Image: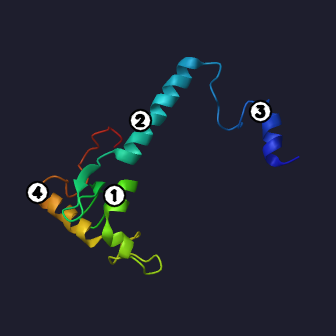
Amino acid sequence: MTRAAARQVASGGRGWAKAPDFDDDPERLAAVQAATERDRAHYLRGGMREIECRSCHACVLVKKTSTFHTSVQWTADARERCNELERADDGGKALLPGAMMPTCPRLSASIDHGVAEGIIPPESPESDPDGYW
């Protein structure tokens, strides 16, 4: 018997023994699901602002946590619109120094413009608007 099967038997067939499913407490199950959705929204979209590339008009979500750190979430549509990402034929290396993913220099300039215009805050606020810190 595999360890996963043994856990299934040990938990009475109700799922993973270390993760309660709260089937017997629908109110708590709903509260856990709501908290999970809040966490997911905070992690994926918290503090993100939409910015449009001034060159190709691709729209991405951006958040700056410091002068040196910028998070960018690309959509499939934005990736299709960006010609610079298509040109990135460098074996998977980033186009800009220090970037962890292929990065468009024109979008980076648009983000810098957004910071200068006050559209994107230059760093994280003192307190989290979602109440996480």
Helix, strand or loop under label 3: loop
**Amino acid type, residue under disc 4 in the picture:** Glu
Label 2 sits on residue: 38
Q: Is residue 52 left or right of residue 16?
A: left
Seen at 82% across and 42% down, the residue is 5
- Disc 4 packing (10 Å; few <14; some 14–19; many ≥20): few
Identify which residue, 69 or 95, lies in the foreground. 95
Circles 3 and 1 in contact, beta carbons < 8 Å: no
Q: Residue 11: which disc? A: 3
Mark 3 and mark 1 lie on one chain; the one further toward the N terminus is 3
- Callout 3, which amino acid? Ser
Q: On the image, numbered disc 4 is attached to which residue?
A: 117
- In the foreground, 113 or 84: 84
Residue 3 against residue 21 in the figure, above or below: below
> Who comes first in sequence, dot 4 or dot 2?
2
Q: Which residue is mark 1?
A: 78
Q: Amino acid at mark 2?
A: Arg
Q: Is residue 42 visible?
A: yes
Q: Residue at x 31, y 65 (%)?
A: 82
Residue found at the very far bottom of the displayed protein:
90
Structural distance between the alpha carbons of marks 3 and 1 = 45 Å
Extreme-right residue of the structure: 1
The spot of residue 129 in percent (x, y) is 27, 40
Under tag 2, what secondary structure? Answer: helix
The answer for how far apart the CA atoms under marks 1 and 2 are is: 26 Å
Real-space Cα separation, disc 1 to disc 4, in angstroms: 22 Å
Cβ–Cβ under 8 Å for marks 2 and 3: no
Please say if the residues under marks 1 and 2 sit with CB atoms less than 8 Å apart: no
Of 89 and 24, nearer the camera is 89
